[in-house]
Image (tube, rainbow, N blue to C red):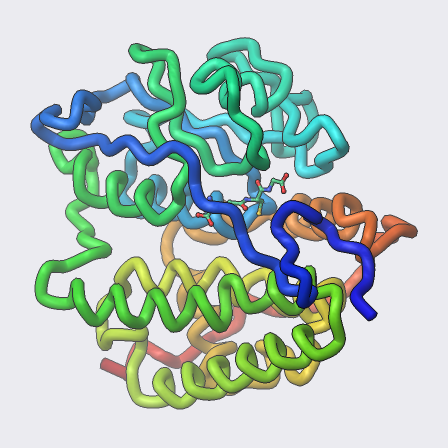
């Protein structure tokens, strides 16, 4: 028998969690042909440090050194029935840009009939006064590609010669790992849970093998796929292993994946984007159907700063 779902509108009769589609998918371009020209000071990110999808956009903003070009406001990690909220607290704040109390205010300002879940990340346009995009996939690409006239860094996370391979590996990692942990954790049927967990660990085993001889997924330079994987790996032992019952192995048990995780974590500027307090409190306190006591575990102890010895790989 199926149990009670965390998000009933996104649950199939078989007990599977099927994520809703992103609602806003306008596109910022360098030349402005889309109606949304790249500009400094025009766009603003609303994010949560806790959310892996939002974390991806925070990372691209950081790696491209776009902090002074695109502003950012962080929501309270604790989400109640009113959804993501702007409050003053450690690592989060009120919304000084628009004075929104809830992220739903931004959704309503964009589409007064919006009925879906109100999710982070969101990129807000201060000129059009609406959400440009709430798709993290698109936002990663836009921040990487459209703002080169303003970005201090020349890093390219989606190089032309690798695009097809990147798309394929992104898909594999999304289906089995990024969304895999949610399919396991939000499953309301034993069968569906077991299937998701098996697929997840099969994929992690394959990725561990791939990373034995390569420093990053595509060789000596990281690309967007590495960061798409990173946001799940960094939450894994602290949250997905216990809260989502993905507990066949931990990341620390994988020699290559763990060293790779440390390598990415130690990349300049990245550790500052990882907020374990927000991550743990968000998951353990917000999903009442999974953790009704709202007790946040103390562990795990993990040393992400120790040497990873991956510089020798290419
Ligand atoms: N837009 C993202 C999904 C973003 C998402 O689901 N974010 C979660 C937090 S990790 C959220 O905001 N959830 C709000 C809610 O469940 O009400 C995607 O491309 O898959």
Evaluate whether residue 112 shows in this view.
yes
- The answer to which of 14 and 49 lies nearer the viewer is 14
Residue found 62% across the figure and 21% down from its top: 102
Residue found 33% across the figure and 41% down from its top: 139
- Is residue 94 toward the left or the right of residue 222 in the image? right
Is 205 drawn above or below residue 241 in the view shown? below
Q: How many marks?
A: 0
Is 216 drawn above or below residue 122 in the view shown? below
Q: Residue furthest right?
A: 293
Pinpoint residue 244: horizontal percent, then vertical percent.
Answer: 70, 65
Pinpoint residue 96: horizontal percent, then vertical percent.
Answer: 52, 12
Location of the N terminus (image quadrant): bottom right
Pinpoint residue 159: horizontal percent, then vertical percent.
Answer: 14, 59
- Is residue 80 toward the left or the right of residue 205 in the image? right
Pinpoint residue 177: horizontal percent, then vertical percent.
Answer: 50, 70
- Is residue 259 toward the left or the right of residue 243 in the image? left
Location of the C terminus (image quadrant): bottom left
Q: Residue furthest front?
A: 13
Residue found 33% across the figure and 35% down from its top: 25
- Is residue 124 toward the left or the right of residue 78 in the image? left
What is the quadrant of residue 78 in the picture? top right
What is the quadrant of residue 214 in the picture? bottom left
* Ligand 1 quadrant in view: top right
Evaluate whether residue 238 shows in this view.
no
Residue found 47% across the figure and 79% down from its top: 257
């Amino acid at each position: 028998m199926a149990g009670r779902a965390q998000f009933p509108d996104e649950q199939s009769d078989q007990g599977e969690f099927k994520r809703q589609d992103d609602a806003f998918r306008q596109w910022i371009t360098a030349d402005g042909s889309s109606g949304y020209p790249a500009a400094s000071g025009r766009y603003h990110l609303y994010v949560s440090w806790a959310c892996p999808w939002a974390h991806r956009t925070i990372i691209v903003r950081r790696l491209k050194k776009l902090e002074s070009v695109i502003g950012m406001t962080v929501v309270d990690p604790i989400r109640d029935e009113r959804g993501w909220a702007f409050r003053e607290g450690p690592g989060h704040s009120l919304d000084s840009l628009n004075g929104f109390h809830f992220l739903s205010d931004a959704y309503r300002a964009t589409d007064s009939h919006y009925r879906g879940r109100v999710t982070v990340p969101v990129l807000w346009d201060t000129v059009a006064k609406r959400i440009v995009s709430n798709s993290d996939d698109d936002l990663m690409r836009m921040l990487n590609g459209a703002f080169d006239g303003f970005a201090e860094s020349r890093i390219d996370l989606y190089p032309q010669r690798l695009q097809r391979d990147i798309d394929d590996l992104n898909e594999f990692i999304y289906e089995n790992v990024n969304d895999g942990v949610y399919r396991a954790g939000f499953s309301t049927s034993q069968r569906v849970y077991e299937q998701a967990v098996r697929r997840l660990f099969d994929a992690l085993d394959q990725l561990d093998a791939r990373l034995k001889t390569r420093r990053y997924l595509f060789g000596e330079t990281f690309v967007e796929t590495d960061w798409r994987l990173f946001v799940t790996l960094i939450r894994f032992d602290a949250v997905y292993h216990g809260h989502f019952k993905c507990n066949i192995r931990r990341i620390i048990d994988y020699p290559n994946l763990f060293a790779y995780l440390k390598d990415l974590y130690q990349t300049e500027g990245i550790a500052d984007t990882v907020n374990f307090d927000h991550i743990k409190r968000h998951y353990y306190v917000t999903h009442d159907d999974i953790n009704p006591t709202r007790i946040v575990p103390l562990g795990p102890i993990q040393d992400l700063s120790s040497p990873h010895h991956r510089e020798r790989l290419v």
